[in-house]
Image (cartoon, rainbow, N blue to C red):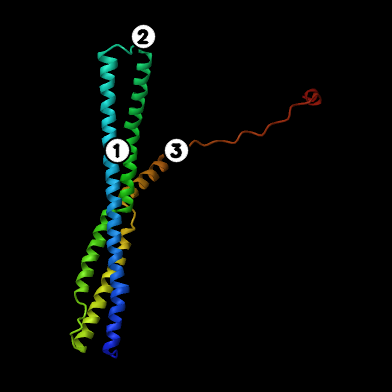
Amino acid sequence: MDELDRNRMEAIYRIFDKFALEDTRVFYKDTIQRHRRAAAQVNFIRAFAAFLAGFSAALVGLIVQSVYVSGSACLAPVATDQMGYCQFINVVIVILMVLAIVAPAIGGAFSTLADLYQWDRQISLYDESLKNLAVADARSPDPEMDDATYRAALKAYSLGSLTVMYDEAAQWGQMIRTPVQIEEFIRRSQERAQSVQLPIFKAPDAPRPRPTGEDEAVG
């Protein structure tokens, strides 16, 4: 870089600023927004599933208490004019019971999804990288600098930006590790599989031919 003249250094700065630093900054911002939307959607689904499970269970208890305990409209024998009403109540109770069982499972599935993708950690990673990139951008050379100062500023600016990009990429070695919950689940499953004693099956004896008349006579 010491052999470059001023025009070449300015050209290198413009190219690096547009196609390296600015593109990286846009990528960081888009990634942060995308991960925040995904995390918000997953958190909403988890909260809604928990609310739906609790609401369904409470409503089932209320309906059973009011219809089958306090009142006797749907207790056997059911009057003919109450048959349709009681059938509708039974269908509603079944639906609410299914929701009370399925909703927590859905919430647990999305909790596992959040642990797998780790959106919060990724948001923190890219947000910190974006701040460090702004610090590196503050070292960018100024057109009013003399050649020696401009050259030093360009070197500090480019090395600082590349260091931020390298540190961000190096973090992926820690980000792609299997979550602790999944490792614990796999370990328990393996221990459970090893503890199960499978029965030993013995192959049946080969079929023997039926004795003929001559064999019976010999016997």
Q: Is residue 168 above or below residue 3?
A: above
The quarter holding residue 205 reads top right
| Other-residue count near label 3 (Cα within 10 Å), few / some / many at <14 / 14–19 / ≥20 | few
Q: Is residue 86 above or below residue 111?
A: above
* Numbered disc in front, either 3 or 1: 1
- Quarter that holds the C terminus: top right
Q: Secondary structure at mark 3?
A: loop
| Residue type of the residue flagged with mark 2 | Ala
Disc assigned to residue 49: 1
Name the residue rendered at 49%, 35% in the picture: 199
What is the C-alpha distance between the residues marked 1 and 2? 37 Å
Name the residue rendered at 31%, 64% in the picture: 27
- Quarter that holds the N terminus: bottom left
What is the C-alpha distance between the residues marked 3 and 1? 38 Å
Q: Is residue 58 above or below residue 9?
A: above
Location of mark 3 (residue): 197
The location of residue 57, given as percent across then percent down, is 28, 28
Q: Secondary structure at mark 2?
A: loop
Which of the two residues, 28 or 100, is positioned nearer the viewer here?
28
Location of mark 2 (residue): 79
What is the C-alpha distance between the residues marked 2 and 3? 55 Å
| Residue type of the residue flagged with mark 1 | Ala
The location of residue 200, given as percent across then percent down, is 52, 37
Name the residue rendered at 32%, 36% in the picture: 103
The location of residue 18, given as percent across then percent down, is 30, 74
Q: Is residue 119 above or below residue 215?
A: below
| Other-residue count near label 2 (Cα within 10 Å), few / some / many at <14 / 14–19 / ≥20 | few
* Label 2 with label 3: CB-CB less than 8 Å: no
Q: Is residue 1 visible in the rendered structure shown here?
A: no
* Numbered disc in front, either 1 or 2: 2
